[in-house]
């Protein structure tokens, strides 16, 4: 093991001693402490005792293959930044990367053997984001990930009534110019003992406990009250005058659950709130996944068609991941498609992800739909999306989700692009 003043520590598991020694040398020159082993059990002891910040993992090994290692790391709640290496081919590597990310691990790259020292060094020295790939699993400045303790329906009901659940706002910008196009609303629960809880934990609870409509209306009401002044303020240099598309002002995007699609009264109430606050229907976009629309396809078609007739926008979220995305895109009156972040976040490492991303952008353009890429984490991905003509982007490369007051300061401090 080599020592260094660097706080970054790389743990390497690879049965090829030459590769292991090569990675060790490259990492040491980059200033990382290194530890190399060929033995899986020694590897897991080091994970617990040495607490590496980075892990380089070979997929194909005789004693325990990479998938088994990934599964055990996930069960242990490993937070290290992981680089997967192998000579099995890019498609298998990409699949392993997606598998690890789906297990909640923090995958920062995949390397096909042989790889260049420069590429490995780039990964080791890059800024390491939290485990956010393939869904909102982590946060950075907005708070720490809450522990997975049990939540009750009664706790959730009290949180809604007391205002403990608040809207956060993530900016969406025009890909070509950087002009502000609007915000997506993302609910956060400030729990008194568990800290900041993300919606992946409490939305399912709201659905099964019958609280989803109350939660949706509460968060929507708070978000609309925050948004209303932005629709009318501004003197040409502020957010109120900005437009993503000619004739369409800044928009607010709201996620809706499959359970709410049967409640027409809920959407009537949202429309009334918009009217009272002076927010045109065109300013609000409802985002839903294809599975939401499939639960009751006839009722979904009725409601969504009605919403579009009233002027609201509809976005098909996580496009490209479901077996019937194309069918839903054709049968329902969407105005926007959102490329699933699993493709966007791996675009620079995966030719397949770039191909799918380009296809979705071209498809949206041919159908007259706006195309949004979410999960944009770095400038390289942003440049690629600009090169293929993507309309809108959102992600930590632009800004992370923020409380309303922080979002206002972000807008005030931003250099506006016209």
Image (cartoon, helix red, strand yellow):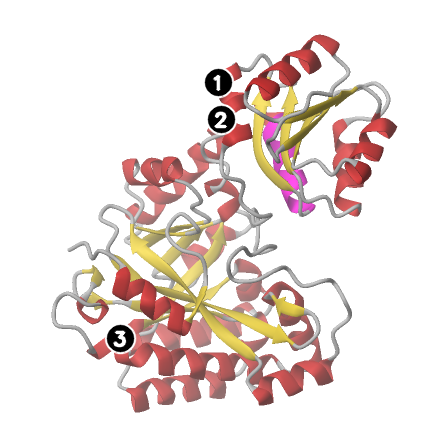
Graded by Cα atoms within 10 Å as few (under 14), some (14 to 19) or many (20 or more), the crowding at tag 3 reads many
- Closest to the observer, 342 or 84: 84
Q: Closer to the observer: label 1 or label 3? A: 1
Q: Position of residue 385 (x, y in %)?
A: 34, 40
Q: Which residue is mark 3?
A: 230
Element marked by disc 1:
helix
- Rounded to the nearest whole Å, what is the CA distance between mark 1 and mark 3? 46 Å
Q: Closer to the observer: label 2 or label 3? A: 2
The picture quadrant where one finds residue 58 is top right
- Closest to the observer, 27 or 251: 27
Residue at 45% x, 79% y: name it.
220
Q: Are marks 1 and 2 in contact (CB under 8 Å)?
A: yes
Element marked by disc 2:
helix
Q: Position of residue 24 (x, y in %)?
A: 66, 17
Graded by Cα atoms within 10 Å as few (under 14), some (14 to 19) or many (20 or more), the crowding at tag 1 reads few
Quadrant containing the C terminus is bottom left
Residue at 48% x, 85% y: name it.
266
Q: Are marks 2 and 3 in contact (CB under 8 Å)?
A: no
Q: Which residues are magenta?
A: 93-103
Q: Which residue is mark 1?
A: 118
């Amino acid at each position: 093991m080599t020592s260094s003043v660097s706080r970054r520590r790389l743990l390497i598991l690879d049965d090829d001693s030459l590769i292991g020694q090569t990675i060790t040398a490259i990492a040491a020159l980059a200033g990382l402490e290194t530890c190399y082993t060929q033995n899986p059990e020694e590897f897991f002891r080091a994970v617990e005792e040495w607490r590496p910040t980075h892990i380089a993992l070979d997929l194909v090994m005789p004693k325990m293959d990479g998938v088994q290692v990934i599964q055990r790391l996930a069960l242990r709640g490993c937070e290290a930044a992981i680089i997967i290496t192998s000579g099995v081919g890019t498609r298998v590597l990409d699949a392993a990367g997606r598998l690890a990310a789906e297990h909640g691990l923090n995958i920062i790259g995949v390397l096909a053997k042989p790889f260049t020292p420069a590429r490995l060094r780039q990964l080791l020295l890059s800024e390491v984001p939290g485990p956010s790939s393939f869904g909102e699993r982590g946060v950075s400045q907005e708070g720490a990930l809450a522990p997975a303790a049990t939540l009750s329906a009664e706790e959730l009901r009290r949180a809604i009534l007391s205002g403990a659940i608040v809207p956060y706002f993530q900016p969406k910008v025009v890909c070509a110019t950087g002009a502000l196009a609007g915000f997506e609303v993302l609910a956060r629960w400030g729990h008194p003992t568990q800290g900041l809880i993300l919606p992946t934990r409490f939305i399912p609870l709201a659905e099964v406990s019958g609280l989803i409509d109350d939660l949706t209306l509460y968060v929507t009401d708070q978000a609309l009250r925050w948004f209303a002044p932005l629709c009318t303020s501004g003197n040409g240099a502020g957010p109120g005058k900005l437009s993503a598309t000619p004739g369409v002002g800044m928009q607010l995007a709201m996620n809706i659950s499959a359970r709410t699609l049967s409640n027409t009264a809920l959407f009537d109430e949202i429309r009334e709130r918009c009217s009272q606050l002076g927010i045109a229907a065109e300013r609000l976009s409802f985002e839903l996944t294809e599975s939401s629309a499939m639960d009751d396809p006839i009722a979904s078609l009725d409601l969504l068609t009605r919403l579009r007739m009233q002027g609201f926008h509809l976005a098909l979220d996580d496009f490209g991941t479901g077996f019937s995305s194309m069918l839903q895109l054709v049968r329902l009156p969407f105005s926007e498609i959102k490329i699933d972040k699993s493709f966007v976040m791996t675009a620079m490492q995966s030719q397949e992800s770039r191909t799918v991303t380009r296809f979705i952008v071209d498809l949206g353009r041919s159908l007259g739909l706006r195309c949004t890429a979410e999960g944009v984490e770095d400038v390289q991905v942003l440049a690629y999306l600009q090169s293929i003509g993507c309309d809108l982007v959102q992600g930590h490369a632009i800004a992370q989700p923020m409380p309303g007051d922080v979002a206002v300061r972000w807008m005030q401090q931003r250099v506006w692009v016209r």
